[in-house]
Image (cartoon, helix red, strand yellow):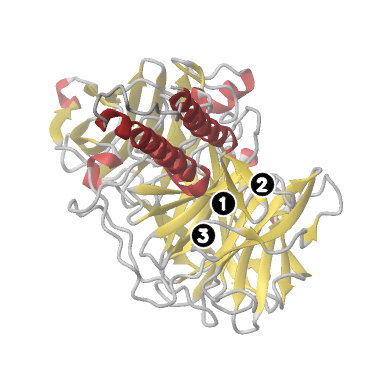
Amino acid sequence: MRLTASIVCLVTALGIGITSGTKADASEHHEGVTTAITQSTTPAGLTSSQFDQLYHYNTPQGFLNDIQSIWKGRDGYYHFMYIQNPMYKHDGDGTVWYHVKTKDFVHYTDVGVSIPKFNGIWFSMATGTIIDNSQGLFTDLPEDALVAYFTSYIEGVQKQFIAYSTDEGASFKPYRDSAIMSAPNDHTDFRDPYMSYDSASKTMMMYLAEGDKIGTYASKDGITFSYVGATILNAGALNGKDLGTVECPNVKTLRDPATGEEKTILFFGANGYQYGSTTGTYYMVGHLDDNRVFVTEQQPKRVDDGSDYYGANFMQDGDARITSLAWMGNWGYSAKDISDDNGITYKLGSISLARHLTLSGSAGNYTLDSAFVEPTALFGKALTGTASSADGNKELLKISRPSAQNAKLTFTNTDGDKAVEGHITITLEQADSSVTIIYDADAATYTATRSTTRLSDKDGVYEYTKVIAASAGSISPRSLTMHILQDQSSVEFTIPGSGKTYTMLRLSTDTQSTIRVSTDGRNALSYSLNTIGSQDDQPSPTPEPTADPTPQAPGSQPGPSASTGITGTPTGSDGKQTLQHHGQRQAQSASTRKLGNTGSAVVWPLVIGTLLLVAGIGILRTVRRPQRSRPASNDTPTDTMA
């Protein structure tokens, strides 16, 4: 009995002690940097939210904002990263770069945190660029390595750092143990490096957001940069109306479809308050001078007319198209206290529908036309119908539908020979939210406004409820179509053929939306409505490794001296392949990945404990077996193994 008790106690102590210690100490180790794994102790408000979208990408934990580089990987997927604060407004608050992949910009799969925070070299992660090493600039790295340039704030000073990856972006290590560039003080803007490599001059170019200008720097080794010029974006350069502090620069090219001339596009985030708008993503068309400094040829325009297309990023998709994603949010209210039915939520942030951008117009008046990558594979059966104001019925439609909804509303005059006239009002009503779009067919303009009970901060409510005016479509058209895509927390719409899109955040937990359509003109309505399912409801295409041995170089500058290397086209699901997970399932899979990565930290103690238990039982059986098999006899020697 004493032997039995001793073995049981030993095994129990080893098993419980080792495994409980593992739970407390489990961590991920990256080049001397230890990141604690958060398991069941993570507050529920960081991992669950009634604002989660159905068919848009949601962050699995915390707060999501700016999108980082988008590129085509060797595995056949498109990859991108975004800034995530997994412990938003909690102990350990700080931002990382979170990695996601997709085959079609409809189904998304988490890869996980690729660049951590607080590693002893940099603090929280801000915006930057990932570029590949296919040009061989970094001779001590393989040509298939990925190199990340990014900003981090060190005691309030904006500094630029470099990290590298040799596992296709799953993880990054510091390339140097200090910053390569630094602002002179803590009140100078010097951030968000956009990188491109010019193969003709064998030069790495850096474009930095510096308040009201984009500073331009050149380097022969990718480490030591020299200032070569700037693109000025102050009031003097913009006809007397500045755009506030600029952020997140990006440089791409497109060809004029008529002349074939290559035009350079400068993208950046800015504040459009002097233009009657909010913060948003802007672009300017121009060219690069001999030092590869961007030179403007026309005034700025918005990529999206809405209030919530910000922190955007762009992928060169051949010489005639750019693909873009953006954070659906606005610093005027997104970081305020926002409550669902369970109280203040700390899981906030989703990504817009992808857009294809193409160039139209002519010299001095170019425009980027924007078209949604629609999640058509997720559309349910269409509900169609018609209504007319000729009967004296000014309310053409009132219907309650699930909040994730695709609506195509086509208007014509009740007199078929005349144009659509007057005002058309579309209202999306929910128990805690409303969105109203009023379109003036006689002027081809519209206003958009919204309200919510989920936001209580006074300044936040002021920004959220601003009335935004924009123009789209043709004046007095014979036919007008409004295409609206609703999700749980967003509304995106376009007038097909206009090249314009509008994106807005919608703070609502109501899973139903009442669509109301009315007009003060003699207009008829034909409508088609589809409920949109979760991206989990339809399978994702199976990715195929790219046939191109040199996949798209993230951050590469296209043109005669550099190749984009992209051949794929994002499409919808073919409905036949493996299901991809998202939302809450992503959070669960992220936890599984983290536990799997601990390897010996978790698995081996359990194995050892099991072996010890088996060994102990074996010893007991060995000890007791002779005693059970001996015949009963008074002459039997006494077993002294007690």
Location of residue 250 with respect to 615 vertically, above or below? below
The residue type indicated by label 2 comes to: Leu
Q: Which mark is residue 243?
A: 2
Q: Residues within 10 Å of mark 3 (few under 14, many from 20)?
A: many
**CA–CA distance between discs 2 and 1?**
9 Å
Residue under label 3, please give it.
169
**CA–CA distance between discs 1 and 3?**
28 Å
Q: Which mark is residue 79?
A: none
| Quadrant position of residue 514 | top left
Q: Residues within 10 Å of mark 1 (few under 14, many from 20)?
A: many
Circles 2 and 1 in contact, beta carbons < 8 Å: yes
Residue 604 placed where, x, y %? 47, 45
Residue 114 placed where, x, y %? 55, 52
Q: Secondary structure at mark 3?
A: loop
Residue 162 lies left or right of residue 445; in this view the side is right
Lower sequence index among marks 2 and 3: 3
Location of residue 357 with respect to 47 vertically, above or below? below
Q: Which mark is residue 282?
A: 1
Which of the two discs, 2 and 3, sits closer to the camera? 3
Circles 2 and 3 in contact, beta carbons < 8 Å: no
Q: Secondary structure at mark 1?
A: strand
**Which of these two is toward me, 477 or 138?**
138
Q: Is residue 586 visible?
A: no
The residue type indicated by label 1 comes to: Tyr
